[in-house]
Amino acid sequence: MALAMSRPIPAEIYEPDEALPRDLVALRQFGRLMDDAFQIPGTTKRVGLDATVGLIPGVGDVITALLSSWILVGALRYRVPPLTILRMMGNIVMDIVIGLIPIGGDLFDLFFKQNKKNVELVIRMRNRTLPPRSYGSIGFAFSLLLLFLVFLCLGIIILLVVGLVRFAGTL
């Protein structure tokens, strides 16, 4: 077991910051800020802005989800495959939905580091054969619009489900 832990991580799984474009390094730093910025005193556990802002009832998880969407913009820029982007969106949605559960959602944020996972997906799954999209390109703008529409639909579905659950609880 000790030998397995001491083996280096292959470059295709983890690329050092020096090997990445500056904007991907910034995304990785953002993921750390969101998930691992602060160490909980007396423990080895780390939390970030995702867990701390998520403590604000009602809006905290929505705010952090909006911040996390920056990683999706990076995925679009680096031409990450659509199924991977959907997986990343699923991570964000799961963080929002479970975050709605009082106390349990906040504890969930201690263990589910969706921002770091999503950043590593961008780095690992980006299309290395094509240059990144420029922020002003039509393809990038169309991708952002499509992403916005999908997020809007997911938001409406979440609101409807939460509303139905609350309505069912009043019966």
Image (tube, rainbow, N blue to C red):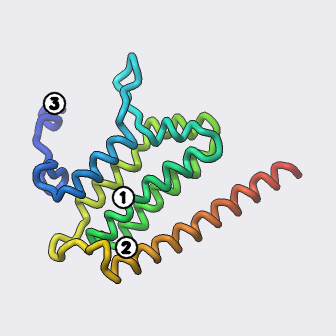
Q: Residues within 10 Å of mark 3 (few under 14, many from 20)?
A: few
Q: Amino acid at mark 3?
A: Ala
Which residue is identified by label 2? 82
Residue located at (31% from left, 80% from top): 137
Q: Residue furthest right?
A: 171
SS at mark 2 in the image: helix
Is label 3 or label 2 in front?
2
Q: Residues within 10 Å of mark 2 (few under 14, many from 20)?
A: few
Residue located at (32% from left, 65% from top): 75
Label 1 and label 2: CA atoms lie apart by 14 Å
Quadrant for the N terminus in the image: top left
Which residue is identified by label 1? 71
Mark 1–mark 2 contact, CB under 8 Å? no
Q: Amino acid at mark 1?
A: Ile
Q: Residues within 10 Å of mark 1 (few under 14, many from 20)?
A: many
Q: Which of the two residues, 157 or 133, is positioned nearer the viewer here? A: 133
* For marks 1 and 2 on the same chain, the one whose residue lies earlier in the sequence: 1
- Give the side of residue 159 with respect to residue 38, left or right: right
Residue located at (19% from left, 53% from top): 13
Mark 1–mark 3 contact, CB under 8 Å? no
Which residue is identified by label 3? 2
